[in-house]
Image (spheres, helix red, strand yellow):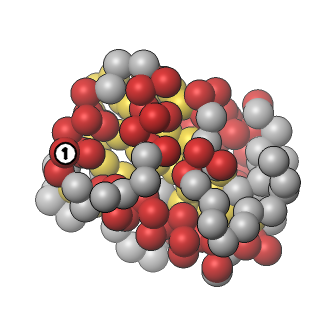
Amino acid sequence: MSEYLTDDFNIADVITEELIDLELQAENKEEAILELTNILYKKGLVSNVKDFYEDVFLREKEGVTGLGQGIAIPHGKSDSVIKTSLVVGKMTQPIEWESLDEQPVDIIILFAVRNIEANTLHIKLLQKVAVLLADDAFIYALHHVETKKELLQLLSREPD
């Protein structure tokens, strides 16, 4: 897989089972984003935990990333991102998060986007995830996955 994504990439190109944690222990948004950032760092996808974390929170100040139905999609566009990736966490307990329906969040899809790819691929990646999240059956399945493999298959399917 190249370091750069092409126009016809699939979500499977930016996530692996190692980038999924189905038992996040965080008790708040900051801890959750730090846990997910550490996964990216351990996999060599971000070069600096602190820099990436700060870039995610810069974006958080711009607007609500809690979409409702228990799902949040925070993202960081950052020079510290080595390879554009997604990391997904499922909370053991829902946490407070600014969301459109003012409900807590238990699934977090964190986008880590290289600054060089920030405009084109970031938008395409967001579009692909947004199409999936517009599907109630997808959201139901997302909340009920039990294995990393199931979650990966769910995210990798092409929208209807």
| Badge 1 amino acid | Ala
Q: Single out the residue that lies furthest toward the bottom.
A: 119
Q: Residue at coordinates 42% horizontally, 59% vertically from top-left?
A: 129
The one nearer the camera, 135 or 24, is: 135
48 on left or right of 17: right
Name the residue tied to disc 1: 137
**Relative image position of residue 16 (x, y in whole percent):** 62, 34
Q: Residue at coordinates 15% horizontally, 59% vertically from top-left?
A: 101
**Relative image position of residue 61 (x, y in whole percent):** 46, 70
Instruction: Report crowding for label 1: few under 14, some 14 to 19, many 20 or more residues within 10 A (C-alpha).
Output: few
Q: Residue at coordinates 75% horizontally, 38% vertically from top-left?
A: 41
Q: Is residue 39 visible?
A: yes
- Name the image quarter holding residue 44: top right
110 on left or right of 113: left
The one nearer the camera, 78 or 1, is: 1
Quarter occupied by the C terminus: bottom left
Q: Single out the residue that lies furthest toward the front.
A: 160
156 on left or right of 85: left
Q: How many marks?
A: 1
The one nearer the camera, 157 or 49, is: 157
Q: Is residue 22 visible?
A: no
**Relative image position of residue 35 (x, y in whole percent):** 57, 33
